[in-house]
Amino acid sequence: MKYLIFLDIDGTLLSRGGVPQRTISAIQKAIEQGNLVFINTGRSKGNIPFSHLSDVPLTGIVAGLGAYIEVEGQVVFSHAMSNEEIAFAMQIASEIRTGLVLEGEQILLDYLPEYMNPHWRQNRPAVESVEDMDRRFPSHRISKISFTNPISAEAAEKLGTRLGVISHSTYAEIFSKGLSKATAMDFLKRRFAIADDHVIAMGDSHNDVEMLRAAGIAVVMGDGNPDVKLLADFISIPSHEGGVGQALEVLVLQP
């Protein structure tokens, strides 16, 4: 039976600005042998660094923490955050004086750029409100939102009354409740009729936890978060050395 394989991007597939050749070769062989390989990323589609992934063969894309699914170039699921959800995020960001990046399927927009962490400021268009966003970018579809600084437990709790929240040490991600990397995996498991024990997920950080728990086989990169490694069925070599490639060689590829 073929495997359904999900790969996080940052710190897993992509590390130190590129994808190791060992990983590219293993993915190519996995697909040639009939397996299905998807990236499964917290980034929205509009925030995926495709220029760094141009040599990576893929069956499809899961983006925006499950908000967007593409199979062989065809969009099969797409969820946009509501204006009410976006306005609530803007309200909290204003209260705690931090910036937001509104991550869309096609575009990225800044909110409150004067407060933004300089690391996040990349000359993106800035909007002042939901109304301003609708007026200037009427075809926008926002998959998820990133806070550009870490948020307090109090702010996370307040956001969590209406939205999904994942806090990181340097930023936070928020998204529509009921969506996750794992819900997208369930969608594709049903679509391709793949048994749970033939679902593999590979990641490295806290926003991969639900994905790893939803997989029959959980793989964590050797340079991944120590807490996340506790979920692993297999711990690979570091990502920049070809951790994804090594895992595919051991777990999937036939001689």
Image: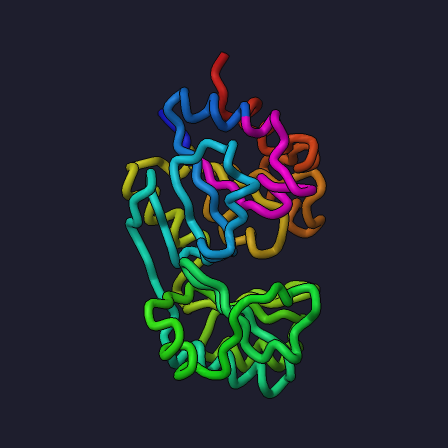
Above or below for 60 versus 101:
above
Above or below for 190 versus 158:
above
Q: Position of residue 104 (x, y in %)?
A: 43, 63
For the stretch drawn in magenta, the main secondary structure is: loop
Q: Residue at x 60, y 67 (%)?
A: 172
Drawn side of residue 162 relative to residue 14, left or right: left
Q: Residue at x 54, y 76 (%)?
A: 111
Q: Position of residue 69 (x, y in %)?
A: 36, 50
Magenta stretch containing residue 70, yes or no? no
- Residue nearest the observer in this picture, 8 or 104: 104
Q: Residue at x 56, y 56 (%)?
A: 207
Name, please, the residue furthest toward the top: 255
- Residue nearest the observer in this picture, 99 or 11: 99
Drawn side of residue 158 relative to residue 198, left or right: right
Q: Residue at x 63, y 51 (%)?
A: 205
- Residue nearest the observer in this picture, 109 or 228: 109
Q: Position of residue 214 (x, y in %)?
A: 46, 47
Magenta stretch containing residue 20, yes or no? yes
Q: Quadrant of the N terminus?
A: top left
Drawn side of residue 240 relative to residue 36, left or right: right
Q: How many marks?
A: 0
Q: Position of residue 178 (x, y in %)?
A: 39, 64
The scheme the figure's colours follow is rainbow
- Residue nearest the observer in this picture, 175 or 121: 121
Read off the magenta span: 5-24
